[in-house]
Amino acid sequence: MKKRVLSIMMATAMIATLMMGCGNKETPASAPAADNTPAANTEAPAADTSAADAEAPAAEASGSLADMKVGVCIYQFSDNFMTLFRTELENYLIAQGFSKDNIKIVDGANDQATQSGQIDNFIAEGVDVLIINPVNSSSAETITDKVVAANIPLVYINREPGEDEEKRWADNDWNVTYVGCDARQSGTFQGEMIVDLGLEKVDMNGNGKVDYIMVEGDPENVDAQYRTEFSVKALTDAGLEVECLSDQVGNWQQDQAQSIVANALAQYGNDVEVVFCNNDAMALGALQAIEAAGRTVGQDIYLVGVDALSEALENVLAGTMTGTVFNDHFSQSHSAADAAINYLTGAGNEHYIGCDYVKVTQDKAQEVLDMVK
Ligand code: GAL
């Protein structure tokens, strides 16, 4: 017998028009004041565990959870980070008592129309809860409306809907929440890793500035905008002058980043002192371009990413990447599953469930690698 305990359940153009190219970007209206930036957290990562080590679910809940159907929409299966996320999510859901057969995870193939059709299908199938990583954050309002109308609780992950949209969930007391980290923190950590090197070391062309190139993720994810903005802000907050040589969108993809960085290195040569990439996949592409150009990370150029993919951590350990930032897919996937369970059991959730990033320089890389491997 199914037990469904449900209450009745951005459009902001926050990231719609990312200005490309260098120059001072406006802080988006939705961004909080600078001093709301999460405090730097360089402590050892929380001893979060993978699903394999997860505690056994409460006996009373596990019986009914086995009958519950979970629909999971991922914006794109080929995304490295979201692959770690969805694998851990599925394992953890099973560890909590859901049946593998009742967990359906679908690939939106980076196309909102495809994903919207998948959501319609899940609604028609009568899933008990939906976990959605939207292709377009700006479609959240439409998605929320149809899911709420079908009385299905909804957990958004990874691509945060806008503030206005989140406010609607609270105002209407809907069973809708968002689980994710605050990307401002990851950007700040990236910048701090460069600040910590000291201007003398970084300013190899001696112009008194940090000359950098920025490779941005898909602007449909606010993470791209915030990482871009807050990495540079950490430099200027530390009193450093900066010079943006190139700022382009690599859509989270290694191959796109490789050609962007190869072109930028060809154009600006030794003036490029720092390469900021909004994620590790792109940092790995940047590294290929850096090596092909005969440059050496740690000696004549610095490179930072975000996510803490194993390959990136190996490079941080080897010194071929300056650093990365752990995007805790364990914590995020577990919190998303826990939020789904809280809706199903009637416990409910806050409308925003956060988590912390972790700064990863060479001294911490092995510790994080041991955790993610
Ligand atoms: C980010 C992550 C990227 C990419 C993106 C997808 O949080 O750092 O690598 O997975 O999410 O929306």
Image: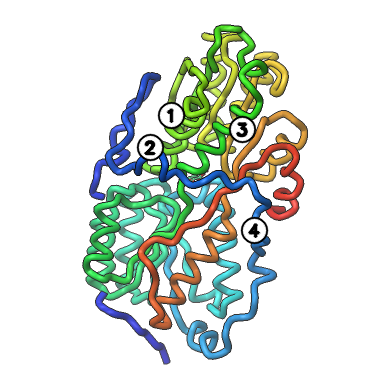
Q: Do the residues labelled 3 and 4 touch (CB within 8 Å)?
A: no
Q: Which of marks 4 and 1 is in front?
A: 4
Q: Do the residues labelled 1 and 3 touch (CB within 8 Å)?
A: no
Which residue is under mark 3? 193
What's the CA distance linking mark 1 and mark 3?
22 Å
- Helix, strand or loop for disc 3: helix
Mark 1 CB near ligand 1 (8 Å cut): no
Question: Compared to 311, does 328 lie above or below?
Answer: below
Write the residue at 36% across / 47% down: 111
Write the residue at 65% across / 72% down: 54
How many residues crowd around disc 2 within 10 Å: few (fewer than 14), some, or many (20 or more)?
A: many
Looking at the picture, which amino acid does disc 2 mark?
Pro
Q: Where is residue 349 in the image (x, y as percent from the top left)?
A: 39, 71
Q: Nearer the viewer, mark 4 or mark 2?
A: 4
What's the CA distance linking mark 4 and mark 1?
32 Å
Which label sits on residue 123? none
Question: Compared to 205, does 334 lie above or below?
Answer: below
What's the CA distance linking mark 1 and mark 2?
8 Å
Q: Nearer the viewer, mark 1 or mark 3?
A: 3
Of the numbered discs 3 and 4, the one sitting upstream in the chain is 4
Which residue is under mark 4? 46
- Helix, strand or loop for disc 1: strand
Write the residue at 68% across / 16% down: 300
Q: Which of 342 and 356 is in front in this view?
A: 356
Which label sits on residue 219? 2
Looking at the picture, which amino acid does disc 3 mark?
Met
Q: Position of residue 18 (x, y in %)?
A: 33, 31
Q: Position of residue 156 (x, y in %)?
A: 39, 60
Which label sits on residue 249? 1
Q: Nearer the viewer, residue 82 or 165?
A: 165
